Image (cartoon, grey):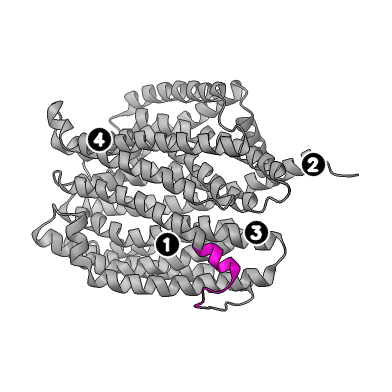
Amino acid sequence: MAVTDSEKSAARLGASRRHAVSVAAGIFLSRIAGLIRERVFAHYFGNSDAADAFKAAFRIPNFLQTLFGEGVLSASFIPVYAGLLARKDDEEARRTAGAVAGLLALTVSIIVLIGVLATPYLIDAIAPGFSGPKRQLTIQLVRILFPGAGLLVCSAWCLGVLNSHRHFFLSYTAPVVWNAAMIASMWGWGGRYAQFPLAEILAAGSVVGSALQVAVQLPVVLKLLHGLRLAFSYQGEHVREVVRNFIPVFIGRGVVQISAYVDALLASLLPTGAVAALAYAQILFTLPVSLFGMSVSAAELPHMSGALGAEEEVARTLRARLDSGLRQIALFVVPSVAAFLVLGDVIVAAIYRTGRFTQDDVIYVWGILAGATVGLLSQTLGRLYSSTYYALHDTRTPLRYAIVRVLLTTGLGYLCAIPLPPMIGVGARWGVAGLTISAGVASWVEFTLLRRTMNRRIGHTGLPGIYLVKLWIAALGAAAVAWEIHRLLRHHRPIPVAVLVLVPYGVLYFAAAMALKLPEARSLLGRAKKMLGGA
C-alpha cells in the first residue's frame, strides 16, 4: 500500500517528537546534576564574596563557550552538515566536519591564550565593583577556568556531529560528568579549606570535568565520522558556507552576551550577594528554557535543515513543524511560569536552602526569579523561530533582532536596576530583579519581530489564542491548589515540602489540560502509557 504525504508528514513529526524527548531527557539529567552542583555550591559559599567572585569569573570564559559553542555551531554547522547527510554526500560531510574542527581548535586556542593574559583588564570591564582580595580571587579563577571553556567548545562540535546523526541523548547527557567533577571537588575539599582556596579548587575541578565531557562523546563521534581528518583550511564550498553562517550568529551571540555582561556589571555595583543571587536565579530560569525550548529546537533543526522540495513544499513542512513545536513548548513553559511566580520560594528553598544559604536568600532569589518569568515564554518560543531561520540558512535576521533586544535590555536594565529602586522606595539590592524584568520585556519584542518576519516568509504560524487561554487556566488553577498545600506545610523541611507541593501541582495541571481536551496533553499521556507498557 502506498504511503500518503500526510502519513509521511505524521511519521516525520512523530520522529521529531521522539528526538525532542531524547534531548529533553538528556538535558533533564544534566540539569539535575547542575542543580545538585548548585545546591552543594550554595551550601559551601552562600551569597558570600567568594560566591560573587566565582560566579563573575565563570561568566568570562563562559563567554568563549557561548560564542563558539553549542548555539552558534548548531546554527551554522548543523544545517550544512545535516543537509549533506540528507543528500547522501557522506564523504563531503566528513571533510567539512574535519575542517570545521581544525579551524575551531586553532581559533579557540589563540583566544584562550589571549584571555588568560588579558584577565585583569577583563575583570575591570565586567566587575568594576570588585576590589581587593575579591578582585584578585576573580582574576585567579578566570585564568584557571579559561582552558576548560576551550574544551567545552570542542564538546559543542561533538554535539553538532551527534545531533546531525540523530544521536541526541549522549550529547545532552555529557555535561553530567562535568557537573560530577565540580561536585566531587566541593565534597572532597569543602570541609578542609576556606572559601577562597576552595573556589580555586572548584575552578580546577571544572577544567577536569570539561575534559571528561569531551572524552565521553569523542569515541562515538569518531565512529560516525570513520575517523577524524583535521584540516586547518578554509577551502571548500561547504566549509566557507559554515563560516559565512557562523559570523552573523557569532556576532548575534556576542551581542546577547554583551547584554548578559551588562547585567553582571550592574549587579556588581549593587550590594554583596547580587551577582551570586542573579546567577542562582538564572540556573532555575534556564531550566525550562533548556528542557523545553532547547529540546524541541535542537530536535527540529536537523529535520528542518533536511527539508527538500519546491519552495512551497519546504514552507509547508516548516509551518507544520514550527506550529507543532510551539504547542509542545507552551504546554510545559506556561506551567513553569506559573510555578516560578506562585511557588518560587518552594523551588528555591528545595534547591538552595542549606548551609550558608538562608531563608532571606530564598526570598531574594525568588524575587529575581519572578522577574525573569516575564520573558520565559517568549525566550523559549523565540529559540524555535531562530532555529527555523537557521534551517533556511538565514543567520542575519536573528542577528538584527538580537541587536534590538540587547539595546532595549541595556537601556531598560540600567533604569530598572540603578535609579528606579530608590525612586519607588525599594532597597538597592532589589535592582537585580529590575534587570530580569527588563530582559523579559526586551525578549518579547525580539520574539514578535522574529514571528512577524517568518510569517511573511513561509505563511502564518503561531499559537492559537484559545490554546494559550486553556493552558493558563490549567496552570493557575493548579497553582492555586498547590499554594494552599504550601500554606499548610510551610514550616516543614524544604525538600519534603517541595515534593508534597510540586507533585500535586504537576498532576493537577495535566489533569486540567486533559479535561480541557488539549491534544498535546493527550499525546503525552499516550506516549507515557506506551513507554510504561513496553517496560
Of the numbered discs in the image, which one, if any, rests on residue 68? Answer: 1
For the point 30% across and 51% down, the residue is 258
- Secondary element under disc 2, as helix, strand or loop, is helix
Q: Nearer the viewer, mark 3 or mark 4?
A: 3
Neighbour tally class for label 3: few under 14, some 14-19, many 20 plus, Cα within 10 Å: many
Disc 4 residue type (three-letter): Gly
Q: CA distance from mark 3 to mark 4?
A: 43 Å
Disc 2 residue type (three-letter): Asp
Disc 1 residue type (three-letter): Phe
Q: Earlier in the sequence, mark 3 or mark 2?
A: 2
The magenta span reads: 232-243
Spot occupied by residue 199 in the image (x, y as percentages of width and height): 23, 62
Disc 3 residue type (three-letter): Gly
Q: Would you place residue 338 above or below residue 223 in this image? A: above
Q: Earlier in the sequence, mark 3 or mark 1?
A: 1
Q: Earlier in the sequence, mark 2 or mark 1?
A: 2
Q: Would you place residue 415 above or below residue 213 in this image? A: above
Q: Nearer the viewer, mark 3 or mark 2?
A: 3
Q: CA distance from mark 2 to mark 4?
A: 50 Å
Of the numbered discs in the image, which one, if any, rests on residue 434? Answer: 4
Q: CA distance from mark 3 to mark 2?
A: 21 Å
Q: Earlier in the sequence, mark 3 or mark 4?
A: 3
Residue 220 appears in the figure: no
Of the numbered discs in the image, which one, if any, rests on residue 5? Answer: 2
Q: CA distance from mark 1 to mark 4?
A: 29 Å
Of the numbered discs in the image, which one, if any, rests on residue 397? Answer: none
Q: Would you place residue 346 above or below residue 216 in this image? A: above
Quarter of the image where the N terminus is located: top right
Spot occupied by residue 469 in the image (x, y as percentages of width and height): 51, 21
Q: CA distance from mark 2 to mark 1?
A: 38 Å
For the point 36% across and 62% down, the residue is 64
Q: Which residue is mark 3?
A: 83
